[in-house]
Image: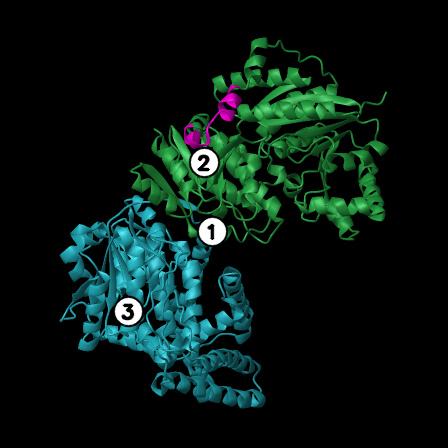
Amino acid sequence: MEKNRYRINVLGVKGGVGKSTIALGLSLLLAKSSKNVLLIDKDIVGTVSSIAGIRGKGLLSKVIDGETNYGNSVAKFNFGEGSLTVLKLYGDGERFYNDNLLLRSNNEKRTLLSRAYKNFLTSQHYDYFVTDNYQGVTANSPLIIDELEDFQSDLSDVIDLRVYVTNYSLNTIRSTIDYAKTFERSITYKGFPLAFIVNMVPNTSDDMEEAKKYASVAKEIIGAKLPLIIPINKELMKFSLNLFEFPGSIIEELRPLVNDLITEDFESNKETLPLDKEETLLSNNEETLLSDKEETSVPDYIEEVVEGNNVILVVGEPGAGKVDLVANVLARKQKNIILVSTNPRMSEKLKKLGTDFTNLTVMHKYREDRFHLKNLNEIIRVSKKLSTEIMKALRDNSILVIYRANDLSPASGCCDVFAQKQEFWSSFISNLKFEGNVPMIIICDKIGNECEHLEPFVDYVVEVKEGKYNIRRVGE
Amino acid sequence: MRVLNVIYGLSPFLISLIFTYFTYVSLPTVWIAYGIWLSMVVGFYLLLDFYKLARLAKRYELKYSLPEKAFRVASFVTSFNEDPEIVKGTLIAVKAATKKYGDVYLLDDSTDKRISEELRTFCEKKGIIYLHRENRRGFKAGAINDALKAVGDKYDLVAIFDADQRPVENFFEHVLPYFEDPKVAFVQVPQTYSELYSGVSIASKHQQEPFLRVIMRGRSFSSAFSLGSGCVFRISALKEVGYMDESNVTEDAATSLKLHEKGYTSVYIDVPLIWYGEPPPDLKAYLGQQSRWSFGHFQMTKNILTSDLPFSKFVDYYSELLYWYKIGPLVIFEFLGPIVFLLFGVPFLIMNPLIYLMTYIPFLTIVLLIYVYVMRRKGEYGVKGFFYHLSLQFLEYFVVTLSFIAWILRRKRPFKVTPKGIGRFDLKSITPSLVVLVLLVLALIEGFFKLISTKNELLYYAIIVNMIWAAYQALFFAVGLWISFKIMKREEYIAEERVIII
């Protein structure tokens, strides 16, 4: 009897949690286990394609631009009897939305894309399909349904599985569970949620234990088959972004998942669930704290948020009082303040208040490089180099302050503005947050869409307007 | 003194001696043969070190972020009869950069009363400390030493700026963090030639490129040496070596050598932290500058050979020295050769010209290819930069050789500040190059006639080899002379409150 075929969708509500890494690791391990795998890059940022060395546009962009040479939207790698094919479907940044609208109004192009895509799906026999998705996509977003329609029409026998990925932050775990529940409710085709993965867990036994509990609770709530935790990976920091040098240790962490897939035995992982944990996890006592706050007392609240190793984005028009707000919060903290500055205003303010801090000045070299990046890989490399340098300055009980985000954000002509900023902040923040394990305050001047690019990667957004503050948790 | 260093130092001379022994024609012409061999062997040594530094420079990487460090800084601006408007502009920039870190001093050695009065008044108004000396003992190095002995104890670091080299406002934010490491004796930033109003100024900017983008990058954190201006020293380290070396006209390089001998290291930050700098505006000024630099290096010959440097650092310093030998006295042999042979029919080297062609032409091609490969995408260098650079270099053979002779005869050359301002064409400066160009052209004509009349096949190829050489050199001399003619109009300079942040 022929074996079942599976499609594994890697999903997550937030950026920078490691979706692309996991999608890639999973595909590699399957391919190395003598399976034929098609990895479909549906993330509009295009990380997976970039690592696979695909420099051409995605299929959608090509169809819209009237190009017919699809060869460089795909890359194939052989591993013994198995193979991994990476197909760049979207991955050209924000133009997706516009392209998608055009496509919907143009039947001819729509048919063209459909035909081209189906051609890729069936040109070879694949045992597994893996999709990497854009953060927080809903089940009825065009990013999901348009492709799925084509997929299902030809490959309706393929069983659809969902893998949800979160980082090790209570907020994100919580919002990922909510996200998964909503997503699962709106699915009509055959399949089930496969796994709930808590990624980037600090390598201490307490944290590992804690993460394991969260993963099990989440698994129960959404009805997934397998909880999985993946510790922070040092090798990933040094990853050269070349597919062949993908860290083997990450692949190994995914082995339980792949074993289940290959043996098609999804029921042996039953773990007993400590029920009281579910309640703790879901009772949102922070929530009540938030809504009752008076606007003027927000700095106190920020202080509490800071205690929880969160990433806080402070946004507002230039001159709205962001520096004053943050400086006042910091002045009251008993923490080692590490200020990463591109502009002396913040450090001058802190000195005036008599606050002790370490000032890391961002050098000309960085400011030059951020305008001259050649591709997404270079953006990630630059982001890693900067965050690694900052990490070296961190000590115990540090708090990291970044002033101003606008001057760190990459601004080169190489690639889609949206994609480069997303890639940069995703890797920058997750490196510092999970490797450095510190709370972080990022200050951003509201100029253009700059600050919006950061939002998916932070836990809280504080908006400052005419000296008044408003705080909200991201993902709600 | 280290034995390995001395052996390496003497080796090109010995190797050339061996080549000469096998190829010389007669005793009266043996010196030409030796000179030509030495020039080629030295060229090869220079290439080896350049290649080594290019490989290191490839790995040269600057940090993206550095922790702010507070050191007490004295900023010295040195001046000697320069246009006060230019000095004022520099003082404004240095003051803005020094801000909270310390104080700005103008070390004014001007002999022109009107200039020194104007600068004194300006300094008083701007909160800059004005120091004036009547005697010019030790010239620039002496001025720095006198000031350091008077006020140095109040500071950790001293920054030195020439009257025309202006730092950006965040100069010290970039430089100070490196002094966290107690082994760092000084930090150098690249000098900038921004006022390009003549062929010579453009060419000297290009000439700096291989040096600033490859050699200095490769020597950073090892043997990078001070360029005198745009340099920040640790005062305690300077004290240890007896302050700036006043006995040498390039006190910057001589002092660097002493610091490296003491085991200190130095950092070169290749970031445009100097935004304004005046290149030599015309050939006369350029030759004056090169004559001083070469003289200073000839003075260092013994210090370098007997220095207590680790081999790798020694090779860098020694190559720097060989460079001046190569472009001065040695290059003369290279054009003397074809002139003597073609024009006067005197052979000086026995070698099968075919073997020569088959070995030397590929060698030269490889050298050029390596050079082009290393320099690609380095600033605005390119093919034009290459031509400008080499052509200008040919024009200085005479003054560098004069420096060499002056050093041999133990004659002191007066310290001359490179004149700045409006460029002028100067016939005296081009005469030595013009003479060589005329001789080379005559040799080419004579060579052509000999070529069509000769029956001897070996002689035929020998003439071709010499003609190739003569043509190669004549081309660079001609381009060099053309460059020295080019002088553009320049507007009068007025100091303004201008501060640049990068």
Say which residue label 3 marks: B87
State the mark number for residue B211: none
Say which residue label 1 marks: A367
**Could you tell me the amino acid type at mark 3?**
Val
Q: Measure the C-alpha gap from mark 2 to mark 1.
A: 21 Å
The numbered mark, 2 or 1, whose residue comes first in the sequence reads 1
State the mark number for residue A441: 2
Tell me if B389 is positioned left or right of B116 in this view.
Answer: right
Q: Is residue A295 magenta?
A: yes
Q: Chain drawn green, letter? A: A
**Could you tell me the amino acid type at mark 2?**
Ile
Q: Are marks 2 and 1 on the same chain?
A: yes
Q: Nearer the viewer, mark 2 or mark 1?
A: 2
Look at 50% across and 63% down and name the residue there: B371
* Chain that bears disc 3: B
Q: Chain drawn cyan, letter? A: B
Task: Please report the bounds of the magenta region as a residue range.
Answer: A285-300
Q: Nearer the viewer, residue B287 or B445?
A: B287
